[in-house]
Image (cartoon, rainbow, N blue to C red):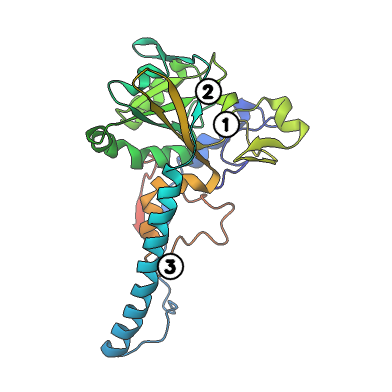
Amino acid sequence: MKPSSLDQPTAAAPNAKWLAAHQERTRTTIVVPPLPASFEHPTVVSPEEWLAARRELLREEKEHTRRSDALAARQRSLPWMRIEKNYVFDSPEGRVSLSDLFGSRQQLIVQHFMFGPGWEEGCKSCSFMADHIAPTVVHLAARGVSFAAISHAPLAEILPFKQRMGWKFNWVSAHETDFNTDFHVSFSPEDVARGPVFYNFTEQDAPNNELPGISVFARDAAGAIYRTYSTYGRGVELVMTTYRLLDLVPKGRDEEGLEYGMAWLRYHDRYDTVTAGS
């Protein structure tokens, strides 16, 4: 996912003005055009030629799968970093610690969900991520993994949006903690205006005060908590299976020429009308 200055308010954009424009954009009717008569495609071949080409590609796909398996093993084998701070978050049940987010399990996945103080809605791209994660929470739990979304906004601003989206996963507020700052996903307006910030393990300009990510934690038998993995930027696409499916169809993601990569995206309750060719 490539965050855009058009997707969330920046230090230079007043919140009220952004919200008005943002709400108007997200309520726009979506019209899906039909495929053009001259829909481009590769050379049409015989069934025998197609089978030969498919088998050749299959060999590459299998090699890619093996490389992906090896990379996943390296991701799991990163050294761990002990969490020394006692982070405490606001939840619907009251104040909860990072340890509480594990529940009875030893592993925890956190979505750093872009939702800043004063926003009426969470980030569309992070919402897209959450739409994919929400149905998997029960399956993660069956494998000893808990999930929580953590945002910078106060809990009172998060809960109405969560209810609107219909999500049931755990979502807490880090509003009065250093958590988002320590994990380099929230920045002050002064930080953004001053220049490069530390994000995705390097110094770069921040398009927004809030940025996305995923972090993984483990808790040992003594109760100590460790950071085992984090990914940011396009690394979070790993949960966006819609993109993976689009990658398979002839037109792909079809984002070339858009104002920014995910300009087509809406909240799942804002695709008011989807028509073909009207």
Q: Secondary structure at mark 2?
A: loop
Residue that label 3 marks:
251
Instruction: Locate the C terminus and report the quarter of the image it occupies.
Output: bottom left
> Considering only vertical position in the picture, is 100 above or below 259?
above
Disc 2 marks which amino acid?
His
Residue at point 51%, 50% (across, down): 262
Secondary structure beneath disc 1?
A: loop
Q: Which label's residue is closer to the chain start, 3 or 2?
A: 2
Label 1 is placed on what type of residue? Val
Q: Pinpoint residue 9: horizontal percent, then vertical percent.
A: 61, 32
Residue 102 at x, y percent in the picture: 34, 23
First-in-chain label (1 vs 2) = 2
Gap between marks 3 and 1 measured at Cα: 33 Å
Q: Which quarter of the picture shows residue 68?
A: bottom left
Find numbered disc 3 in the image and state the secondary structure of the residue it sits on. Answer: loop
Whole-Å distance between the Cαs marked 1 and 2? 9 Å
Q: Is residue 1 visible?
A: no
**Percent position of residue 69, x then y:** 38, 55
Marks 3 and 2, Cα distance to the nearest angstrom? 37 Å
| Frontmost residue, 211 versus 270 | 211
Residue for badge 1:
185
Is there a contact, CB below 8 Å, between mark 1 and mark 2? yes
Circle nearer the N terminus (3, 1):
1
Q: Position of residue 151 (x, y in %)?
A: 49, 25
- Name the residue carrying label 2: 152
Type of residue at label 3? Lys
For residue 159, side relative to residue 113 (left or right):
left
Q: Is residue 251 left or right of residue 181?
A: left
